[in-house]
Image (cartoon, rainbow, N blue to C red):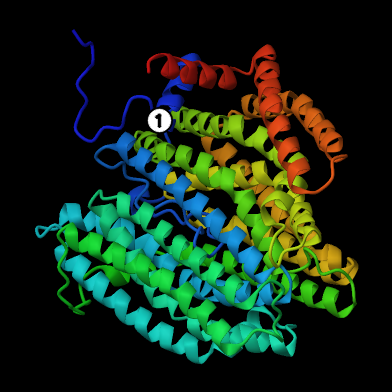
C-alpha cells in the first residue's frame, strides 16, 4: 500500500528545498535564546514596503514585492513560485544580455543604448516606483483587509491616479529626451548623443508600461497571485532577445554610432519597448482574470492616499540618494568610455555597458540566493518585532545572513577566480571582442569582492524595515553615498581612462561597506548585539574553506590556458575547477566544522534520499 502522505492543495512537491525549511533546520541545531523583551517599533512594519536593491533600475532592479513584510496565505508555496520565477527570469535576462553584447558591443554604441534604456527606469523609480513599492502596496493590502468593500474603491482610485500620472510623465520625458541624455551622459560624442537621444524617444515610452506593470503586479500580489508578476518579465526578455538577433542579422557585427541607420535605431527602440508592452498586457490580463474590473475614479479626498504619500518622506529620500548614486556612476562610466576612445586607448571594458554587464552577473547570487532567504525572513522578523523580542529578531538576522553566506562566499571567491574566462566564454562573440570580454571580466573581479558587503547591507536594511524604521536607513545612506561619489569622481581625475570603470566597483562597494558599518552599529545598540562573533566566525571559516578551491581554480586556468583558442580553454577550466573546487569546499568546510554547511548538506542529502 502506498505510504504517500496527502498534500494540501497547491503545496509544492516535497523534493523542493525551500529557505523556510533550511532556516528552521539551522534554528534547531542552535541553542535557544533567553527572552529579551522591550523592543519597540517606530511604526507598524506592515506600512512599509520593500524597495528591492533600489540602486539598479532596469528589468532586474527590484526582486522583492512591496508587501513582503506580511506573510501570504501559503508562504512556502509563494516562496517557491517567487524563487523559481526569479531564476528563470534571471536566466533569460542573462541570455538577453549576451545577445545585446553580441549585437551592440561594449563600446560607444553599446553605451548609447544602455544609457537610453536606463533613463526610463531611473525616472520611473525616482518619481513613481519608489512610492508604489514603499507605501502604496502595503496601503492597498491593509485597506483590502479593513474596508467593507475589500479595498475595491482604493484599488480603483490608485489604479486611475497611477495611470494618469504615468501618461503625463511619459509625454513630458519624451519631449525632454535630449536633455535627460545630457544629464546622464554629459560627454557623449556628437554621433553617440544623437543615437542615444533618438533611442530615448522610443524607450521613454516604456515609463507608462513599466508603471502599469508595477501597479498590476502590486494588485495581483495583494490577491496572493504571485505567478504572473514573476513570470511575465520572461516574455519581455524573449522579445528583446529576438530584437537583438534581428539587429545583428540586419546590421552585422561592429556597428558604431556613425554607421547605424535610423531604421536600425527604430528597430532597437520599438522592439525593446514592445517587450515592455507585452509584459504589461500579460499582467493586466492576469489582473482581469483575478477578478479586477477597472472603474475610473479620482475622488481622492478622504481616500488616505495623500496621508500615505506624506508618510513616505524618508523612503523617498533613500530612493533619491540611490538615484543620485546611479547618476554619478553613469556619468563617470560614460565619460571614461569616451575619453578612452578619444585618447586612442583600447576602449575595451571602459564604458557603462561593460560596467552594467559585469554588474548583472555580480548581482545574480544575491538575486537568487539572498532574496529567497529575505522573502522567508521578513515575515518572521516582523512577527518577532510585534512580540517585542530582541533575542529572536537578532537570531533571525544572524541565521539569515549566515545561511546566505554559505553559498554566496564560495560563489564570490569563484567569481574572482573565473571572472575573465567566464566573461570571455559568454560575451566574446559578434560585436564584443575577446578584449572587450576580458574588460568585463576585470570589472567583475572587483565587483565580486563586494558581494558579501552588498548582501550584508541589504539584510541590515530589512531589519530596520521590520522595526518600522525608515529614517535611519535614509540617514545612513547620506555618508555612504558621499563616500561612493567622492571616490567615483576622483577616479576621473586620477586613473587612466581605460582603468576608471575597472576601479569603479571599488567606489560602489564603499557605499555598502560604510553603510554596513553604520547600520550594524545602530542595530547593535538597539538589539543588544547582532550575534557578531558567530557571524564573523562563520565568514572567516567560509573564506578559509574556499581557499583550496580558489588555488585549484587558478591552476586549472593556467593549465588549460596552454590550449589554443578561447572557448575550449575557458570551458574546461570552469568545468574542472567548478566540479572539483565545489567538492573541495564541501570537504574542507565539513572538516572545519562549519555547522551551517553541514546542516544544509544534511538537508539536501535527506531530501534526495526521500525521492
Secondary structure at badge 1 equals helix
Q: Which image quadrant: the N terminus?
A: top left
Which residue is pictured at 10% across the width and 60% down the height? 149
Which residue is pictured at 71% across the width and 74% down the height? 331
Quarter of the image for residue 522 reads top right
Q: Is there any visible trace of residue 55 in the rendered image?
A: no
Judged left or right of residue 302, residue 22 is right
Query: In the rendered image of this protein, does residue 480 appear above or below residue 455?
Result: below
Quarter of the image for residue 170 reads bottom left
Judged left or right of residue 611, residue 339 is right
Q: Is there any visible trace of residue 351 in the rendered image?
A: yes
Among all residues in the image, which is located at the extreme top? Answer: 1
Among all residues in the image, which is located at the extreme left? Answer: 148
Q: Position of residue 353 (x, y in %)?
A: 68, 67
Q: Where is residue 555 in the image (x, y as percent from the top left)?
A: 84, 31
Residue linked to disc 1 = 20
Amino acid at each position: 500500500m502506498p505510504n504517500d502522505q496527502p498534500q494540501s492543495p497547491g503545496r509544492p512537491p516535497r523534493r523542493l528545498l525551500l529557505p523556510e525549511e533550511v532556516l528552521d533546520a539551522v534554528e534547531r541545531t542552535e541553542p535557544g535564546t533567553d527572552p529579551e523583551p522591550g523592543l519597540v517599533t517606530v511604526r507598524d512594519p506592515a506600512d512599509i514596503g520593500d524597495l528591492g536593491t533600489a540602486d539598479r533600475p532596469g528589468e532586474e532592479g527590484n526582486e522583492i514585492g512591496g508587501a513582503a513584510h506580511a506573510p501570504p496565505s501559503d508562504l512556502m508555496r509563494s516562496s517557491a513560485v517567487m524563487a523559481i520565477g526569479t531564476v528563470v527570469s534571471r536566466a533569460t535576462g542573462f541570455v538577453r544580455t549576451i545577445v545585446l553584447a553580441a549585437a551592440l558591443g561594449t563600446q560607444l554604441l553599446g553605451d548609447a543604448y544602455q544609457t537610453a534604456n536606463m533613463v526610463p527606469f531611473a525616472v520611473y523609480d525616482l518619481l513613481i516606483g519608489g512610492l508604489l513599492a514603499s507605501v502604496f502596496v502595503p496601503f492597498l493590502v491593509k485597506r483590502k483587509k479593513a474596508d467593507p468593500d475589500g479595498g475595491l474603491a482604493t484599488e480603483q482610485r490608485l489604479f486611475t491616479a497611477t495611470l494618469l500620472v504615468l501618461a503625463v510623465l511619459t509625454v513630458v520625458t519624451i519631449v525632454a529626451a535630449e536633455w535627460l541624455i545630457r544629464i546622464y551622459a554629459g560627454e557623449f560624442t556628437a554621433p553617440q548623443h544623437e543615437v542615444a537621444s533618438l533611442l530615448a524617444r522610443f524607450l521613454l515610452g516604456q515609463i507608462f508600461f513599466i508603471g502599469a506593470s508595477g501597479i498590476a503586479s502590486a494588485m495581483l500580489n495583494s490577491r496572493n497571485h504571485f505567478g504572473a508578476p514573476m513570470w511575465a518579465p520572461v516574455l519581455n526578455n524573449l522579445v528583446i532577445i529576438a530584437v537583438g538577433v534581428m539587429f545583428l542579422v540586419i546590421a552585422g557585427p561592429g556597428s558604431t554610432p556613425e554607421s547605424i541607420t535610423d531604421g536600425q535605431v527604430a528597430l532597437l527602440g520599438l522592439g525593446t519597448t514592445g517587450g515592455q508592452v507585452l509584459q504589461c498586457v500579460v499582467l493586466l490580463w492576469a489582473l482581469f482574470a483575478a477578478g479586477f474590473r477597472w472603474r475610473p475614479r479620482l475622488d481622492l479626498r478622504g481616500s488616505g492616499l495623500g496621508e500615505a504619500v506624506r508618510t513616505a518622506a524618508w523612503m523617498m529620500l533613500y530612493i533619491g540618494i540611490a538615484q543620485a548614486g546611479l547618476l554619478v556612476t553613469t556619468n563617470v562610466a560614460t565619460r571614461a568610455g569616451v575619453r578612452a576612445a578619444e585618447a586612442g586607448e583600447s576602449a575595451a571594458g571602459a564604458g557603462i555597458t561593460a560596467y552594467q554587464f559585469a554588474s548583472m552577473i555580480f548581482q545574480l547570487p544575491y538575486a537568487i540566493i539572498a532574496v529567497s532567504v529575505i522573502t522567508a525572513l521578513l515575515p518572521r522578523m516582523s512577527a518577532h518585532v510585534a512580540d517585542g523580542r530582541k533575542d529572536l529578531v537578532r537570531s533571525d538576522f544572524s541565521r539569515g545572513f549566515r545561511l546566505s553566506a554559505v553559498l554566496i562566499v564560495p560563489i564570490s571567491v569563484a567569481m574572482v577566480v573565473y571572472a575573465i574566462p567566464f566573461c570571455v566564454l559568454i560575451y566574446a562573440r559578434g560585436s564584443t571582442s575577446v578584449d572587450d570580454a576580458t574588460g568585463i571580466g576585470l570589472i567583475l573581479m572587483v565587483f565580486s569582492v563586494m558581494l558579501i558587503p552588498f548582501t550584508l547591507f541589504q539584510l541590515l536594511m530589512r531589519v530596520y524595515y521590520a522595526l518600522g524604521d525608515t529614517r535611519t536607513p535614509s540617514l545612513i545612506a547620506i555618508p555612504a553615498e558621499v563616500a561612493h561619489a567622492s571616490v567615483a569622481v576622483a577616479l576621473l581625475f586620477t586613473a587612466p581612462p581605460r582603468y576608471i570603470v575597472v576601479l569603479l566597483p571599488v567606489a560602489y562597494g564603499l557605499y555598502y561597506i560604510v553603510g554596513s558599518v553604520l547600520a550594524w552599529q545602530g542595530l547593535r545598540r538597539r538589539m543588544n548585539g547582532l550575534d557578531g562573533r558567530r557571524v564573523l566566525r562563520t565568514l572567516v571559516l567560509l573564506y578559509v574553506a574556499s581557499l583550496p578551491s580558489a588555488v585549484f581554480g587558478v591552476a586549472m586556468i593556467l593549465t588549460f590556458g596552454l590550449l589554443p583558442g578561447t572557448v575550449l580553454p575557458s570551458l574546461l577550466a570552469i568545468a574542472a575547477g567548478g566540479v572539483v573546487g565545489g567538492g573541495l569546499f564541501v570537504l574542507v568546510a565539513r572538516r572545519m566544522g562549519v555547522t551551517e554547511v553541514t546542516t544544509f548538506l544534511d538537508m539536501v542529502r535527506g531530501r534526495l534520499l526521500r525521492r
